[in-house]
Amino acid sequence: MEARSVPSLTDADDRTLAGRAADGDVRAFEVLVRRYSPLMRAYATRVLGSNDETDDVVQESFITAWQQLSTLTDPSVVKSWLMRIVSRKSIDRIRVRKLHVDIDDHEQEAPHSSTPPQVAEAHSREAALSRALNDMPAEQRQCWVLKEIAGYSYDDIARELDLPVSTVRGVLARARKNLIREMEAWR
Amino acid sequence: MTDDIELEGFEPADLDGHTIDELSDYLAAGRQPLDPSIESSPGCQIALAAMLRLRTISLALLESDVAEQPATDESFIAGILNSIGFEAQAGRSIPVQHPSAQASLILTEGAVRGLIRAAGDTVSGVLIGRCTLQGEVGVPGEPVSVLVDASVFWGESIPLAAARIREAIYAELLKHTELNIVAIDVTVHDVHLSRSLGEASVEEIE
């Protein structure tokens, strides 16, 4: 009879799970995948501006995470570490897209059918921001999401997007003004 | 699109000479050091409030995006788990003696960590986290220390749990390896409450 209290991995804290996964425990890794997939998918969809490639990006991110987990010195920060990986993978996708479509100066926005789901967005404030973000030029949206949602610094964004810091500042300034205008108008 | 978007109410003339970018940096720095010329400007205060609102909505947007995600597809998870290799965590090679001089037997460090984890987990109310082997594990007889991270159920005695973890790990390593274990250090980093068992855990344990 199994009367002993065996703590469940599902409830384990991040440090335990990431530590075990770094040591090769696939079950612990699976719990991390289940725990952070929704966040990583939501975030990648925002950076990418559509959910066409979200699944691929998040899967790739987890595979990279598994390979590099042993290099994570503080397993308790696994969540922000995963977010960094998914940021990078999303940006890589955008780069590849650019290589394909950079012939003209057009903003290649995602088709409207695949923009982030807005149906159930109960809060109209958030719906308004969602629309404003989707309508923005891709570069502005990416910089904004990295800065305000992921908490990147100007330097980080410049490095990740391979742009001069001054350009990033300029893009963010425009994004900020665009969004303030949209949101203040909504108010 | 033009580089300079005019935004009524948010231009330097409205902000007592300050710019939105400046105010954004000021906000990012936690309004430190306090700038009286910003704090006493009604125009700046309006702009700061608008930026704070925007930030709050941005974070709320991600939260609601997360809440709207469909349940994670099992095939999505399987896709990840089927693609990960095990070499990444194999670590160093640990020799094990064999009666035959021709045979060379090794255990991977990853396998030994697996043994340690399984042994530690047998202790009631304990979950083992990261585990590290310190020392020249590749050289027989060299002193090796084991460092384990553990979380313990709320209500368990931590010193007692740590002692049991040590015993369990030591016994297991003695049985399966020839490592010269000189120390087993246990770090209890978390005392956890079971979320799934909740208050019913008392009944479960009886």
Image (cartoon, grey):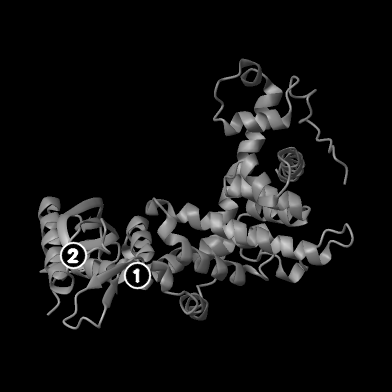
User: Which of these two is toward me, B150 or A6?
Assistant: B150
User: Could you say which quadrant of the image residue B192 lies in?
Assistant: bottom left
Q: Is residue A169 above or below residue A117?
A: above
Image coords of residue A54 (percent x, y): 62, 68
Q: Residue at x 78, y 68 (%)?
A: A111
Residue B203 showing in the rendered view: no
User: Could you say which quadrant of the image residue B132 lies in?
Assistant: bottom left
Determine the CA span between mark 2 and mark 1.
22 Å
Residue B179 marker: 2
Which quarter of the image is occupied by the C terminus of chain B?
bottom left
Q: Is residue B186 above or below residue A33?
A: above
| Side (left or right) of A94 relative to A153 | right
Badge 2 element: loop
Q: Residue at x 68, y 71 (%)?
A: A52
* Subunit of label 1: A
| Side (left or right) of B158 relative to A87 | left
Image coords of residue B61 (percent x, y): 60, 53
User: Could you say which quadrant of the image residue A100 lies in?
Assistant: bottom right
Q: Residue at x 21, y 69 (%)?
A: A6
Badge 1 element: loop
Q: Residue at x 76, y 31 (%)?
A: B10
Label 2 Cα crowd, 10 Å radius (few <14 / some 14-19 / many 20+): many
Label 1 Cα crowd, 10 Å radius (few <14 / some 14-19 / many 20+): many
Q: Amino acid at mark 1?
A: Asp
Residue B103 showing in the rendered view: yes
Image coords of residue B13 (percent x, y): 80, 23
* Subunit of label 2: B
Q: Amino acid at mark 2?
A: Leu
Residue A25 marker: 1
Residue A128 marker: none
